[in-house]
Image (cartoon, helix red, strand yellow):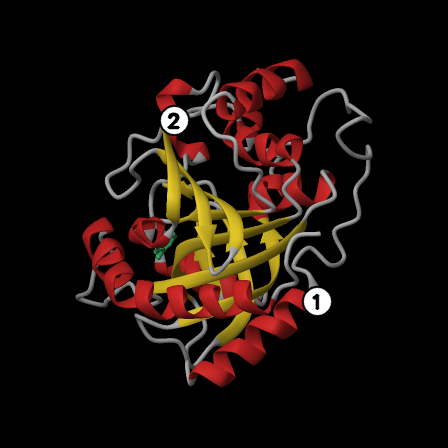
Amino acid sequence: MTIFTRAEFEAAAAAVKKQTKQEPRIGLVLGSGLGDLADSVENADIIPYRQISHWPISTVVGHQGQLHIGQLEGQLVIVMRGRCHYYEGYPISQITLPIRVMQLMGVEIVILTNAAGGIDPSFSAGDLMLITDHMNLIGMGGTNPLIGPNDDSLGPRFPDMSRVYDRDLRALAVEVARAEGISLQKGVYAGLAGPSFETPADVRFLRAIGANAVGMSTVPEAIVARHGGMRVLGFSGISNVAIDDPDSDRETTHEEVLEAGKVIVPRLTAILRGLLRRLDSPS
Ligand code: HPA
């Protein structure tokens, strides 16, 4: 098992710092089909992932592979246009290296976004869901980015996960959605490894254990961000309704995931802009 160390995280952070003078306070990870939000960043220093040592490069369509560091609603942000997933074959501690880079750059708040399948029967494709909590299903199977010797300079050996998604930031997100007239679902995100989509039996299992949405990202990043003492907020764009009946004629495809992203981006952008406006200016 490959385990990345602080020295490797520092090398990657140094490669980023070499290309920007801006010191972002807020990190934003854009999921499948949501990358166009990065175009909203002003005065952006754009850094291709391949120029950053150890940075995992996504091979997935819809994940472009650039950092945009600049301003959004007066806040300095570092935006990941595309992310890498565990199913692409990288070690889990490399999948979360970008979050460590944010930590070492002084980022205080990480906003994670993803495309997810709707498990809750009341959800429709195109809905936006505020993540209230997650289920670390791949972690329960032994795949946790914190496995290996703990570096106490990065975070504690046994980090608390009782409130991964920051309560104040969630309340702010709800307030912004209301003010903008955007309907916002709330729920628990179940994180699986993928890349195969769920069987109908998987979907019924996930519903029975209390999941509202399912996807293949976010959970490892949220864990590392909390380990590193950063505040976390998460949104799922419900790209498709997960199929719970083996006799259904429907199928789940990556194309529909990307298509749904297009209708979700404007609402997600409005919520993020509203949030950033309401956050205190950097001290
Ligand atoms: N399942 C898992 N991951 C996903 C889905 C899904 O239905 N949709 C988008 N990401």
Left or right: 164, with 120 as reference point: right
Q: Residue at x 24, y 50 (%)?
A: 254
Q: Nearer the viewer, residue 191 or 97?
A: 97
Picture quarter containing residue 151?
A: top right
Whole-percent x and y of residue 228? 72, 38
Whole-percent x and y of residue 277? 54, 67
Q: Mark 1 points at which residue?
A: 167
Q: Which residue is drawn at 51% across and 23% down?
A: 91
Q: Residue at x 62, y 69 (%)?
A: 170
Left or right: 248, with 224 as reference point: left
Question: Please, what is the three-letter code of the amino acid marked with disc 1?
Answer: Arg
Confirm whether residue 106 shows in the render.
yes
Ligand 1 visible in quadrant: bottom left
Whole-percent x and y of residue 132? 61, 66
Confirm whether residue 242 shows in the render.
no
Q: Name the secondary structure under disc 2.
A: helix
Q: Residue at x 46, y 50 (%)?
A: 71
Left or right: 173, with 68 as reference point: right
Lower position in the chain sequence, tag 1 or tag 2: 2
- For discs 1 and 2, the disc positioned in front in the rendered view: 2
17, above or below 74, in the image: above
Q: Which of 58 and 17 is in front in this view?
A: 17
1, above or below 174, in the image: above
**Real-space CA distance between mark 1 and mark 2, rounded to the nearest whole angstrom:** 32 Å
Question: Please, what is the three-letter code of the amino acid marked with disc 2?
Answer: Tyr
Left or right: 8, with 213 as reference point: right
Whole-percent x and y of residue 147? 69, 27
